[in-house]
Every structure is written in C-alpha cells, then in structure tokens.
Image (cartoon, rainbow, N blue to C red):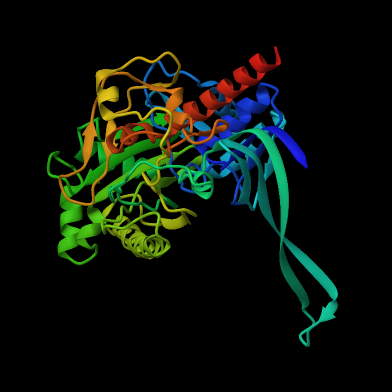
C-alpha cells in the first residue's frame, strides 16, 4: 500500500495551495482531482480575477509563487493595483509545473470511493481510477476497434487528509457532521468568455458613458486595453448600462432575469477577450441536488446565448465578437459546510476577533448574493481573522478542510469563500500539518 504524509482531495484553489506548500515543506504529498486539470474555480469555473482581500494577508507563499510563474508564462497582469488577473487556460499548465516543482504526486480522473476508519482516525482511503482498455482482437464490421472502459481501485494510506472538494464530498463520505443550511443557498452562476472584441473601442465608449470608477475602470497596460464594468437589476446604484438593458428587455432581446447580474473583466494574455461573471440563475435551486444543477446549467447556457447577442447588438467593439468558452463547471457560492472544532460566526468577523492561530487575515466584504431584486448583501467590514480550528474536523483527528466548505455560519462564509482566502486556508492547513509532524518526530 502506498503511504503519504498528506493526501489532498480536490485540486481547486485551496487544494492546490495545500498540496504545493505541503510538498515544498518536504511532506510526501498526493493530490487527487476528479477532472482532467487543476485550478477548480479559476480554470473550470473561469472565475477571474482573484479579488484583493486586504494589505495584511497571511499565508500567501503559494499565491506569490503562482503570480511569478504565471508572469513567466505571459499569463498574468497587474491591473488596478491587483496582481490577480490571470489567464485561465495557461493557468492549467502553470499549476502542473508547480506541483512537479514541489514533488507533489497528482492523480487526475480519480475520486475517493471509500475509507477505512478506526474510531476518530482515518487509516486509509480507496480510490477509483478510470482507464480505457483497447482490445485489438475484437473487430466490428465497420473495422473500428472495440473499447472497454474499466474502473481500477487502489488503497492509499496517509497521516493526514485535507478535504478541499468545495462541497465536502470526502467529509460527506465518512459521515462528518455538517452545519445546517436551512436551504440558504446563494444563486449559482455559469461564466463564459467572448473573443473577437475591440476592447479599445468598448473601453473608450465605457469611459464616455460612465464616470463612476468604483464600477467602470479602463487602463492601457503595455499597449493592451484592460477593463472592468458591471450592472445589476438592483436599484441602489445608478448604473450607466441600465438604459441598454432596459431597452433590450423591452424589445425582447433579453429576458428580465438575464439582467439580474452582469459583470465583465479583461483577461491576461487575451487582448481581444472578456470574461463574463454571469449569468446568475435566479430560480431557487439547490447545488447539492443533481436535478437542480442540471436545470441551472441548461438555463444558464440559454441565457449566455441571449447575453452574447445582446452585447453584439448594443455595445461598440462587439461587432465581430463570439462565444469562445463556457465554463466546465457551475459556479457555486455556498453548499455544504463542515462542523469544525470552531464554528466561525458573522459576529466574530464583524468584531475583528483575534485568534492565537489565524489561518486567514482579510478585509473582503460580506458578499452574499440573492435571487431577489434589491436583496443581495455587499457589506464592507474591518480586518478580520479566521482561526485554524475552523478548518479542523471535530469528528476526525487527522482530517482538515480548506475552501468554501469551512466551518463558518452562512453570512461569515459569504466573506471567506473568495479565492484569496481559499489560497490562505490551504496553505495554513499545510503549514499546520507540517509543524505537527515535525514536532512529533522531535
């Protein structure tokens, strides 16, 4: 049986940080990913850029190394004093390189099938790997080769396990206790990219119609236009794009629900493309229910076609634009949250409570989306800390979580679910495990 110091389950934002730092600290590390590449929300979900989360962030070694490696690959730009503007396609390649540099073993197309448990300790896991076997001795009448798909299982042992699946898939498998959600789910989104855009023309037009630099920014960096703008159907702001969405709904070019949330960002290394943080699905759907997720995906792709046609018809610079990429995974803001050794609350966050062993320091606002008009929350706060204990399972001594499935109440999770904090969570868990192993060996 293979043995590791750390097995990280889930190769998204927090999982990559945890695996990379574990490897860099000399721990024998395995990273298990069910898809065919790493990155999670940033790659499969097209969630770019990484939003800034304050000037005093901790556990940023992975993030800083990621920025350097992406810059070398021409896949990063610093815009509006934020270095987190990445290229999601090149990021897949960069993450492979970083795991190799850190001596992390990576398994793609793999999921955890079972686990061996002794009391409150995880002894080992059983993983399943899909393979495709070719039997050349079987010939069909059309002369095509017959393929037979098989599942192989393997048992692997580790001292510590990190669930960074986003939805606590591993913790659910081993019957961990979860915090009640009371059907409190933020609406899901499906991001997409459009190419063939004249960003200079679009940017110049935006600057003409919108003077609010908290909403619309345009900047030329090394001869390339970078920009960001937004609109929602909420009435608390004066949105420069509102007349265009109103007209499109009136003329039947958009459904009313299509305009509930609209946001675009330029992309490093893609000088004619924009990443769309929309559509947001307003129907009350549960991200833990397959039928609901399927319905959301279908509705979202229909909306993407309408939104792309709307941009081409109403916005300068989109005359030759086209849909170049639709996210491989639905964007889920909150789903399962584990019950940890500490349950972090919105009162902890708002009071700026200090902890002996902080995993995250951030000032990102409480950002909770709603399916209803004028009901979302975007509340600025002071600086706050998340304790490492909120990333420890209360059920198993050698299980940690990292990412949006942390032990936090619904409103506090709304501030901590962002990528910058997820990077810090994964790194903090890796450093904690390394310290425990080092002290036990002393």
Residue furthest to the right in view is: 137
**Front-most of 144 and 158?**
158
400 left or right, relative to 238: right
Q: Is residue 251 above or below residue 179?
A: below
Q: Is residue 335 above or below residue 86?
A: below
> In which quadrant is the C terminus drawn?
top right
Q: Is residue 222 visible?
A: no
Q: Residue at x 20, y 40 (%)?
A: 209
> In which quadrant is the N terminus drawn?
top right
**Front-most of 104 and 257?**
104
Q: Residue at x 36, y 56 (%)?
A: 319
**Front-most of 242 and 123?**
123
Q: Is residue 143 above or below residue 116?
A: below
436 left or right, relative to 346: right
Residue 152, percent from left and from top: 73, 58
Residue 128, percent from left and from top: 67, 54
**Front-most of 435 and 137?**
435
Q: Residue at x 36, y 44 (%)?
A: 334
Query: For residue 138, what is the image quadrant?
Result: bottom right
- Count the labels in the image: 0
Q: Is residue 306 visible?
A: yes
Residue 176, percent from left and from top: 47, 43
Query: For residue 73, what is the image quadrant?
Result: top right
Residue 427, percent from left and from top: 54, 26
Q: Residue at x 56, y 43 (%)?
A: 10
């Amino acid at each position: 049986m293979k043995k590791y110091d750390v097995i990280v389950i889930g190769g998204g934002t927090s999982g990559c940080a945890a695996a990379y730092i574990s490897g860099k600290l000399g721990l024998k590390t395995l990273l298990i990913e069910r898809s065919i590449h790493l990155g999670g929300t940033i790659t499969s979900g097209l969630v770019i850029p990484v939003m800034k989360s304050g000037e005093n962030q901790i556990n940023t070694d992975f993030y800083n190394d990621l920025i350097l490696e992406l810059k070398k690959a021409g896949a990063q730009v610093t815009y509006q004093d934020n270095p987190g503007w990445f290229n999601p396609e090149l990021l897949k390649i960069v993450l492979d390189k970083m795991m190799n540099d850190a001596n992390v073993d990576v398994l793609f197309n793999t999921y955890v099938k079972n686990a061996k448990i002794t009391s409150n300790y995880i002894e080992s896991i059983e993983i399943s790997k899909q393979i495709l076997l070719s039997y050349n001795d079987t010939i069909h009448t059309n002369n095509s080769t017959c393929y037979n798909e098989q599942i192989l299982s393997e048992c692997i042992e580790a001292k510590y396990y990190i669930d960074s699946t986003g939805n606590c898939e591993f913790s659910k498998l081993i019957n961990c206790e979860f915090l009640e959600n009371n059907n409190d789910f933020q609406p899901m989104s499906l991001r997409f990219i459009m190419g063939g855009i004249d960003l200079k023309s679009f940017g110049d037009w935006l600057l003409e119609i919108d003077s609010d630099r908290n909403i619309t920014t345009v900047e030329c960096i090394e001869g390339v236009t970078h920009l960001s703008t937004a609109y929602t159907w909420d009435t608390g702001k004066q949105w420069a794009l509102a007349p265009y969405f109103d007209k499109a709904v009136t003329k039947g070019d958009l459904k009313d629900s299509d305009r509930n949330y609209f946001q675009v960002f330029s992309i490093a290394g893609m000088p004619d493309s924009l990443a769309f943080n929309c559509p947001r699905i307003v129907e009350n759907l549960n991200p833990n229910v397959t039928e609901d997720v399927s319905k959301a995906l279908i509705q979202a792709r229909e909306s993407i076609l309408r939104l792309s046609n709307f941009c081409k018809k109403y916005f300068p610079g989109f005359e030759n634009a086209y849909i170049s990429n639709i996210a491989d995974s639905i964007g889920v803001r909150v789903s399962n949250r584990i019950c940890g050794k500490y349950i972090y609350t919105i009162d902890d966050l708002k009071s700026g409570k200090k902890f002996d062993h902080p995993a995250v320091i951030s000032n990102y606002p409480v950002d909770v989306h709603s399916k209803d008009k004028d009901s979302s929350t975007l509340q600025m706060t002071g600086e706050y800390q998340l304790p490492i204990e909120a990333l420890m399972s209360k059920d198993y001594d050698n299980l940690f979580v990292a990412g949006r499935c942390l032990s936090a109440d619904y409103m506090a999770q709304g501030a901590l679910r962002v990528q910058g904090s997820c990077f810090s969570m994964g790194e903090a868990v890796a450093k904690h495990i390394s310290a425990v192993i080092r002290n036990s060996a002393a």
